[in-house]
Image (tube, helix red, strand yellow):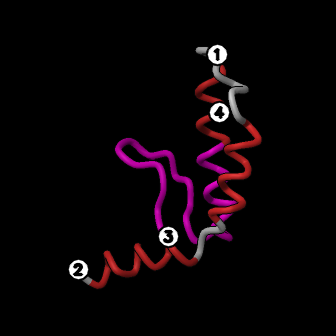
Amino acid sequence: MNKRMLSLCSTLREDIDWDKFFRIVEHTGDDLNSRKDRFDKSDIFELSLQRCSSGNVVWVDKIGWDHEVEH
């Protein structure tokens, strides 16, 4: 595995509070599942990942990818 991939793996493993992120997911549950609300729900989760990473993973919402890692 190259250095960039190892750095990404490290960021995903160490810099994200996964317990907090999945509490948000669990708390949201089946809410926001209507056809119109699903887009808002995905935006909430995308932003939550950024917040749970202390800004190390940034939600960019570009065509082809949603996040960038700051390292």
Looking at numbered disc 4 in the image, what kind of residue is underneath it? Lys
Residue at (59% x, 36% y) in the render? 42
Give how far apart the Cα atoms at labels 4 and 1 are.
10 Å
Q: How many marks?
A: 4
Q: Quadrant of residue 29?
A: top right
Q: Quadrant of residue 16?
A: bottom right
Give how far apart the Cα atoms at labels 2 and 1 are.
41 Å
**Quick one: 4 or 29, which is closer to the camera?**
29
Lower position in the chain sequence, tag 4 or tag 3: 3
Q: Which residue is mark 2?
A: 1
**Quick one: 41 or 61, which is closer to the camera?**
41
Give how far apart the Cα atoms at labels 3 and 1 are.
30 Å
**Quick one: 31 or 39, which is closer to the camera?**
31
Looking at numbered disc 1 in the image, what kind of residue is underneath it? Ser
Q: Are marks 2 and 1 in contact (CB under 8 Å)?
A: no
Query: In the rendered view, does 24 fall on the left or right side of 61?
Result: right
Up the image or down, 8 lies above or below 27; here it is below
Q: Quadrant of residue 14?
A: bottom right
Q: Which residue is mark 4?
A: 41
Which region shows up in magenta?
Answer: 45-71
Q: Which residue is mark 1?
A: 34
Dot 4 falls on a residue whose secondary structure is: helix
Looking at numbered disc 2 in the image, what kind of residue is underneath it? Met
Give how far apart the Cα atoms at labels 2 and 3 are.
15 Å
Lower position in the chain sequence, tag 2 or tag 3: 2
Find residue 3 and report its horizontal and vertical position in percent: 29, 85
Find residue 57 and report its horizontal and vertical position in percent: 55, 65
Up the image or down, 31 lies above or below 55; here it is above
Q: Which mark is residue 12?
A: 3
Mark 4, Cα crowd under 10 Å, few <14 / some 14-19 / many 20+, is some
Quarter of the picture containing the N terminus is bottom left
Find residue 58 and report its horizontal and vertical position in percent: 56, 61
